[in-house]
Image: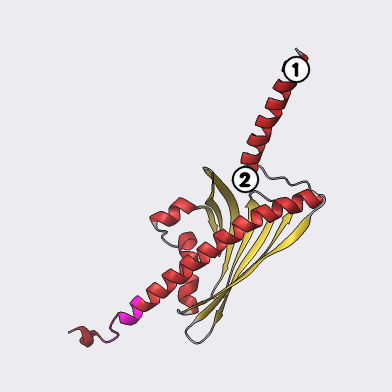
Amino acid sequence: MAARLGWTIAATAAAAGVVGYRALVSGQLTIDLGIGRRTRALGPQVLDINAPRELVFDVIAQPYLGRPTKAQREKIQVLERGEGMVLAAHRTPVGRGLVTQTVETVTFTRPDTVDFRLARGPVPYVRERFSLTDGGGRTRLEYTGEMGTDGWAPGARWAAVVARRWEATVADALAAVKSEAERRHALGRKQPTDPSASA
């Protein structure tokens, strides 16, 4: 009887651990204790983009302020809009059928910065910035940020796990911005500026 009770308790604890882990990874549960907070840098990641800064800014802002594509709508849902700011949910597949959903404020300062601040996610604190620098028709896009977790060393270990996936997701997003901005820029250069040129 005692052995059976022990196995039941162990199985229940294991199941609770799995449920808790899935909730933590998915962003449904955030450990925000307010004690033992440690922060770590995110980035920097830097890309040089062969497109003007205003165009790059527009590409970044489109899913939040403009008309998102179907693919963008599957990843980003704008929950509220304000003056130069939105509250948006981001969905990111993280493997094994799990999807992380974060909720972030996104603030736009045209033409040079886009700031993100985490409201809900797998960690209690993240601040990020996209900085755009004009370089004579080209744009340097730099990503920097900071992530914080509570609980001293165990929290720092969790941050290391989350940060790896987080930064890989950012790298994919930056690559998509570069590709789309350069595509639009190349397309724009192919359009005739003089209506008589197409006659």
Q: Which residue is mark 1?
A: 3
* Residue 85 makes an appearance in the image: no
Asked whether, in this view, residue 160 is left or right of residue 94, the answer is right
One can see residue 59 in this view: yes
Q: Residue at horizontal 64%, vertical 67%?
A: 43
Residue 96: give x, y in percent of width and height.
53, 43
Mark 2, Cα crowd under 10 Å, few <14 / some 14-19 / many 20+, is: many
If you read the primary sequence from the N terminus, does the residue marked by circle 2 or circle 1 appear first? 1
The image quadrant of residue 28 is top right
What is the total number of numbered labels drawn onto the structure image?
2
Instruction: Name the amino acid, label 2.
Output: Val
What residue sits right under mark 2 in the picture? 25
Instruction: Please indicate whether residue 87 sits to the left or right of residue 5 in the image.
Output: left
Q: Is residue 193 magenta?
A: yes
Query: Is 172 in front, or is 184?
Result: 172
Residue 147 drawn in magenta: no
Disc 2, disc 1: CB below 8 Å?
Answer: no
On screen, 190 above or below 122?
Answer: below
Query: In the visual, does 157 lie left or right of 90?
Result: right
Residue 119 percent coordinates (x, y) = 64, 52
Q: Residue 199's spot in the image, x, y percent?
A: 17, 84
Give SS at disc 2. Answer: helix
Q: CA distance from mark 2 to mark 1?
A: 33 Å
The quadrant in which the N terminus is found is: top right
Give the amino acid type for the residue marked by disc 1 in the picture.
Ala
Which residues, given as a range, are shown in magenta? 187-194
Category of crowding for the residue at label 1, using alpha-carbon neighbours closer than 10 angstroms: few (below 14), some (14–19), many (at least 20): few
Q: In the image, what residue occupies the spot 45% across and 51% down?
A: 74
Residue 76 x %, y %: 49, 54
Q: Which mark is residue 134?
A: none
The answer to whether residue 160 is above or below residue 180 is: above
